[in-house]
Image: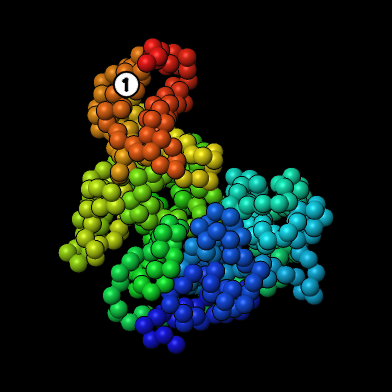
């Protein structure tokens, strides 16, 4: 046993686990190399292919919720108190195929079979969810098949969706176990999780990295991180809260993209929230990636960072010197340089909720329409009074070394009435406020063009009376 490590308690399929490995070990490595459950595959180790998909069941408000996760990016410590389900944990008693596996076989939805366990696990997660994702195809949007072709997988998914008719009339776990979609042991997991011991505190070794969801830090530092002494953001109700206090919304640091999408508070104030969040990665990553992690990672193209920059998000930092509040717009001092002491962590994020006079939009372009890192992303908030822009906030990513709040462009809009000529003038101003570079996601010239096009898209979305052809600026060829 490693004296410096936590004792991590969780249930793996049907077995209670007390893991003694370093808490930064990836769940994938624990599953394959220490539990010898090799149905969970090693693919990209970047969360893109879905071969390593598992389900995580966690207790929230007394209810058991399941979601998919990429185990290659999940630290073992984040399994504490959860039910982790691999493909082996979906096998029915007596060795029979479960209906999801049978549907995949009947429709010829597998060829080499490498990706098949991930698809089956993701589809099981859809069946176990208390509410629908965007759709059953969206439940497998993080799973890639390289040889079978997706039509047969789509047919199998459709067949599975027909099994779920009437599910909303019952508690999900009761429905899927009574219909023998998953093994009967799932019925007793909630009670078993309630009785799991808490994590054993680690010795006071120096914490030299903070990990929340781990969806980016494990991509960057997979080997290095194993030997670190991380501080993990606890997955507790208070750290995943999304609450409104009057006109102010407060988010805990461990709030995930999925939490934001499913929040009633957020849905009530952002009518197009589903469309915005669908642009952020894939379902398993959305289930893991946290808002605080997105901010501190300091990527110039962080989707949530750009979203909340336009909303003037305020970060409450907590450290040895107490608490202080830092505007997100002042948090980035340079590339990967933050206004944050080494011992400080984000305690909460606050912003003013949009009211009836506020319009908001988020746009993103990436090499793939969905599931990919942005080439350029941008958000716009407008407060309208009697047809005039009383206040404007425009943010953009991929156009400089840090996530950008475009102060000059925002100020230019204030006090103006919406018109095609105003938007063309705004687009002419943008190049003076950005400094994109050429990289794998596009040339600097391409990114400049993208930003102007996406800014036009903001206005076309928010003001349907505008005509796209009126926003075209005619220029003479050089």
In the rendered image, is residue 213 in sight?
no
Viewport quadrant of the C terminus = top left
Residue 266: x and y in percent read: 44, 44
Which quadrant would residue 398 be assigned to in this image? top left
Q: Residue pushed farthest right?
A: 106
Residue 411: x and y in percent read: 24, 27
Query: Closer to the camera, 46 or 98?
Result: 46
What SS does tag 1 mark?
helix
Viewport quadrant of the N terminus = bottom left
Q: How many marks?
A: 1
What residue appears at the point 35 percent right and 14 percent down from the top-left corner?
Answer: 421
What residue appears at the point 58 percent right and 52 percent down from the top-left corner?
Answer: 142
What residue appears at the point 59 percent right and 45 percent down from the top-left corner?
Answer: 134
Residue 39: x and y in percent read: 66, 68
Residue identified by numbered label 1: 428
Q: Residue pushed farthest front?
A: 478
What residue appears at the point 29 percent right and 79 percent down from the top-left corner?
Answer: 204
In this rendering, would 280 be left or right of 35? left
In this rendering, would 305 be left or right of 315? right
| Rendered image coloring scheme | rainbow
- Badge 1, how many Cα within 10 Å: few under 14, some, many 20+? few
């Amino acid at each position: 046993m490693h004296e410096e490590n936590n004792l991590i308690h969780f249930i793996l399929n049907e077995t209670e686990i007390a893991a003694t490995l370093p808490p930064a070990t990836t769940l994938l490595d624990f599953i394959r190399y220490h539990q010898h459950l090799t149905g969970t595959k090693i693919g990209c180790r970047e969360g893109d292919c879905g071969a390593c998909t598992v389900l995580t069941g966690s207790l929230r408000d007394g209810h058991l919720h399941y979601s998919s996760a990429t185990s290659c990016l999940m630290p073992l410590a984040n399994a504490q108190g959860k039910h982790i389900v691999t493909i082996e944990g979906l096998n029915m008693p007596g060795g029979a195929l479960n209906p999801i596996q049978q549907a995949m076989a009947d429709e010829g939805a597998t060829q080499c079979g490498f990706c098949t366990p991930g698809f089956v696990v993701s589809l099981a997660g859809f069946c176990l969810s208390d509410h629908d994702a965007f759709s059953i195809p969206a439940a497998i949007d993080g799973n890639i098949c390289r040889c079978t072709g997706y039509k047969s997988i789509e047919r199998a998914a459709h067949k599975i969706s027909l099994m779920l008719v009437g599910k909303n009339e019952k508690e999900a776990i009761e429905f899927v176990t009574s219909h023998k979609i998953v093994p009967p042991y799932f019925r007793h997991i909630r009670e078993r999780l309630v009785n799991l011991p808490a994590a054993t505190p680690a010795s006071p070794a120096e914490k030299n990295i903070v990990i929340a969801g781990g969806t980016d830090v494990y991509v960057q530092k997979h080997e290095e991180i194993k030997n670190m002494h991380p501080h993990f953001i606890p997955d507790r109700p208070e750290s995943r809260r999304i609450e409104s206090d009057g006109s102010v919304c407060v988010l805990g640091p461990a709030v995930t993209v999925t939490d934001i999408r499913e929040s009633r508070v957020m849905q009530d104030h952002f009518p197009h929230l589903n469309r915005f969040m669908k642009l952020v990665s894939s379902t398993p990553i959305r289930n893991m990636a946290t808002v605080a992690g997105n901010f501190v990672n300091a990527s110039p193209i962080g989707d949530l960072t750009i979203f909340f920059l336009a909303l003037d998000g305020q970060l409450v930092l907590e450290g040895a010197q107490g608490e202080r509040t830092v505007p997100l717009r002042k948090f980035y001092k340079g590339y990967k340089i933050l206004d944050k002491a080494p011992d400080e962590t984000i305690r909460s994020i606050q912003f003013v909720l949009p009211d009836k006079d506020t319009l908001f939009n988020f746009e993103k372009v990436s090499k793939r329409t969905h599931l990919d890192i942005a080439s350029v992303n941008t958000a716009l908030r407008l407060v309208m009074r009697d047809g005039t822009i009383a206040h404007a906030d425009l943010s953009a990513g991929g156009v400089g070394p840090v996530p950008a709040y475009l102060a000059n462009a925002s100020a230019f809009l204030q006090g103006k009435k919406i018109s095609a000529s105003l938007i063309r003038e705004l687009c002419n101003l943008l190049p003076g406020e950005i400094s994109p570079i050429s990289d794998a996601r596009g040339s600097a010239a391409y990114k400049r063009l993208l930003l102007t096009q996406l800014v036009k898209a903001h206005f076309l979305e928010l003001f349907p009376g505008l005509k796209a052809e009126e926003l075209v600026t005619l220029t003479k060829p050089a």
